[in-house]
Image: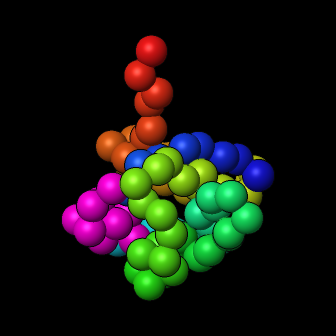
Amino acid sequence: MTKKKVLLCSGDKVNRFVATATKYRFPIHLTTGRYRIDGKSLIGIFSLNLSKPVTVEVPDEGEGIEEFFEEIQEFEYVKDE
């Protein structure tokens, strides 16, 4: 699995993330703590605590994975130092 942390702290960001995720055929999951949900599900994403970063998980191999991560760069979580 390839993983990246994202911050989806508003409804607008969640909508844009799901719109991007649904364009791809490979599975996309969001995890936080012990929860793992479908990254293409609005209801699923809204069930998470979005005040903290969540982890995006996609398969290591597949068509379009690099493009997907390029498209979701705007959501990438960068920890303040």
In the image, which residues are magenta? 9-18
Q: Nearer the viewer, residue 73 or 47?
A: 47
User: Looking at the image, which residue sits at the far bottom?
Assistant: 43
Where residue 73 sits, quadrant-wise, is top left
Residue drawn at x 54%, y 53% is 54
Instruction: Find residue 53 and report its horizontal and vertical position in percent.
Output: 49, 48
**On-image quarter of the C terminus:** top left
Residue drawn at x 45%, y 38% is 77
63 horizontally vs 7: left or right? right
Q: Main secondary structure of the magenta part?
A: helix
Instruction: Find residue 61 and report its horizontal and vertical position in percent.
Output: 74, 53
User: Looking at the image, which residue sits at the far top?
Assistant: 81
29 horizontally vs 48: left or right? right
Asked if one can make out residue 52 in the rendered structure from this viewpoint, the answer is: yes
Where residue 51 sits, quadrant-wise, is bottom left
Q: Is residue 22 above or below residue 66?
A: below
Instruction: Find residue 62 and report its horizontal and vertical position in percent.
Output: 69, 58
Q: Nearer the viewer, residue 43 or 64?
A: 43
Q: Nearer the viewer, residue 43 or 21?
A: 43
